[in-house]
Image (cartoon, rainbow, N blue to C red):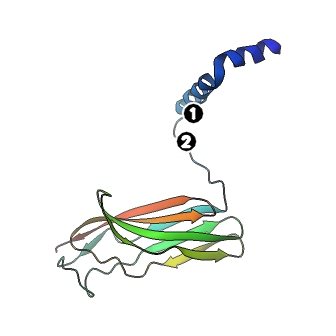
Amino acid sequence: MSKKVSSLRLIGVAGILTLLLTACLSVGPIAFISHGPVTGLAISGPAVIHSDCTVDEDTNPITFKISITTNAPATVTYHIEVYNSGRTMLLDQTPNTNLVFTSAATQTIDSGDMYRNDCGTFIIKLIVTAPNSMTAQTTWSVVNP
């Protein structure tokens, strides 16, 4: 046994990490497991909205179906961000909001209709910051009919 320990000491930390990475890559895609009570996020909405591409209080409202799942009681802190398709410009953002789970459950969030945009492709992100971090996103387009 002391020979095996000596051999592992010679490999070093970098060698062990290389061996682990090689083993993981040879198995295929790696699934990341959440280490916290928030275990799932979902966000969906229409892929395309047909509009005249003007922006005012009456054009291009969109509502997304958003849900957060926990495996235990938790107070979840989240916010929503909207970006242009290249993620180079933050177009809209909600303040941090707390959602209380008294047990393991899935709760739905009302996204409202704050996401009024002219023509183009956009990204909406649901970002959970506590008690553990997770992100979900989807895209949609506003096109002239």
Where does label 1 land, which residue? 24
The answer to whether 10 appears left or right of 32 in the picture is right
The answer to whether 67 appears left or right of 120 in the picture is right
Position of the C terminus by quadrant: bottom left
Q: Nearer the viewer, residue 52 or 14?
A: 14
Q: Quadrant of residue 58?
A: bottom left
Q: Dot 2 lies on which element? A: loop
Q: At label 2, which amino acid type do we have?
A: Ile
Where does label 2 land, which residue? 30
| Residue 64 % position (x, y) | 42, 74
Residue that appears at 71% across and 14% down? 7
Residue that appears at 71% across and 70% down? 73
> Quick one: which residue is furthest to the bottom in this view?
58
Q: State whether residue 23 is above or below residue 56.
A: above
| Residue 97 % position (x, y) | 54, 76
Q: Which of marks 2 and 1 precedes in the sequence?
A: 1
Q: At label 1, which amino acid type do we have?
A: Cys
